[in-house]
Amino acid sequence: MDKILIVDDEEDIRIALKRVLSREGYQIELAESASEAIQRISSGETFSVAISDILMSGMSGIDFTKFIAEKQINLPVILITGNPNLSSAESAIRYHAFEYISKPVDRTQILSVVKRALELKNQKDSDLEKLMLSEKLEKALRTQNLDLNRQNAAILNATSDAVITIDSKLTVVSANKASFEMFRFRTPLDLIGQSVKILFTENKMQKYMSQVSKVLSEEENKSTLQLSDVTLLRSDASTFLADIAICSYSLDGDTYYTGVIRDVTQKKAMVEQLIHSERRAFLSVVAASIGHEINNSLTAIQGFVEMASRENADTMLKDRALKVTLNQTEKLRALTSNLLQLGKSLKSNNEQSKVLNLNNEISSVLQVFKETAKLKYCHIKREDSFEEILIQMNSDQFALLLSNILLNAADATNNIGTIEIVSYKDQKNSHLIVTDDGEGMSPETLNKIYEPYFTTKELGKGTGLGMFVVKQIVDNFDIRLEIDSTPGNGSKFHFIFPKVSES
């Protein structure tokens, strides 16, 4: 409820005004003099509007209005007088009285003036509240901005990456502590204010500056550039390799570009060392496996040849020696085929590809394996088909592909299982499915199956190159390979060949 203070030394006037205003729902407070009103306001009492007589014993209504104006209190003062004159009117204006009314006071007039005074009071209170809130927000933002600047400075100085900002004229305007250390500048002024060109070697300047210029010409706030293995120049004329990320942005109407520079010299050395170590480990594992495979085959060949060479050797022993020699020779041929595949380029393989009949190629591979020890005791389940199923491939590469799958299937079934081969074509592709009822593979094995030296067999029982070579071949000829295998349920290898062009 709005509270109105009536100040008048005449009781009848105070009571009359109170009766009129209280009927409108206002809360009315009375004061017999201006000094009493000032005392109550000074003690902290608040009012929405003050109505004061001008001429009173002691302090006048003008004095009361002057007090309100000097204290900058948002309290509209309505002055009433029974003797209006120019002097009192000028004083009322000087001290910003809200209204100047002459007696006798009309009820309608006083109510209208009070209503307008309250509206002004509320508007000023609202504006003041907004102003105070705005000042609080501005102060909070200034504090937050200061904190963010401190945090950003701490982060920039804590990182080991160099962070350098340039303007549109390619002049360095800021840099963090790591920048001076990375480029070995003695003082900040050796870098700040200089052209960014001092960070590049002379022979690389044109190349990198053209890339940087590309970012500068792009639309602001949307351009980023990643540069890898950039050769940068230190102040002592030494160079190093770095990765750079550059972004552009606008600040206070100016365009700036910030680059984050990471020295990758040590990382490159570590990667090269890791690759070297991996290569040595790969070669040692493969060499041990291949050496063991070759020694086993040569031992078998040598042993049976020596027995067959004896004077008392019978025909059965000689035939046995011949079969063992052929089998081991075939095993060594498959081994060397895998090794040779590792060194072949994809281009040379594709140049030798031609349209083949899938069924004929399968029959050719099975004929070669017909008498080998690996598949001798396996049951090969395949229905003969004279259907022409065309594939675009190299015949030797297909033989190597299917041979590796069949040998793995034989090993998975301990050479006594069933291997089923199915071929067919649909409207889009030719298909080859090889299924075995062997031990199957775990998810972990499936994840590593294409690694070049990964094998689940004992040392000497496999080189780990079979599926690696299969992967090379299917990738080379755009063949899709889907493998379905679970431990104890065997494995299925589904080859989906691309459609052969009619031309």
Image (cartoon, rainbow, N blue to C red):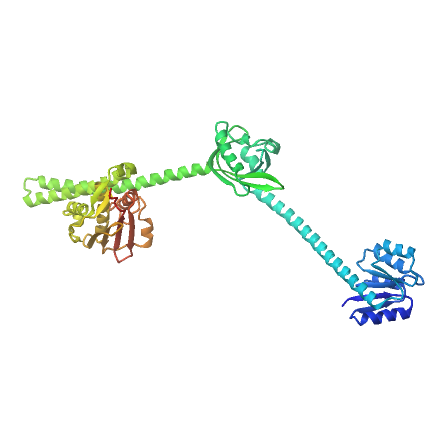
Q: Is residue 68 above or below residue 147?
A: below
Residue 345 visible, this angle: no
Residue 481 visible, this angle: yes
Residue 105 versus residue 44: which sits nearer the camera? 105
Q: Quadrant of the N terminus?
A: bottom right
Q: Please indicate whether residue 318 sits to the left or right of residue 287 in the image.
A: left
Image point (80%, 72%), residue name: 23
The image shows residue 173 at horizontal and vertical percentages of: 60, 36
The image shows residue 376 at horizontal and vertical percentages of: 15, 50
Q: Please indicate whether residue 305 sits to the left or right of residue 213 in the image.
A: left
The image shows residue 115 at horizontal and vertical percentages of: 78, 64
Q: Is residue 91 above or below residue 346?
A: below
Quarter location, residue 27 = bottom right
Residue 455 versus residue 164: which sits nearer the camera? 164
The image shows residue 38 at horizontal and vertical percentages of: 86, 61
Image point (37%, 39%), residue name: 277
Quarter location, residue 53 = bottom right
Q: Quadrant of the C terminus?
A: top left
Quarter location, residue 172 = top right
Q: Please indicate whether residue 187 sits to the left or right of residue 290 in the image.
A: right
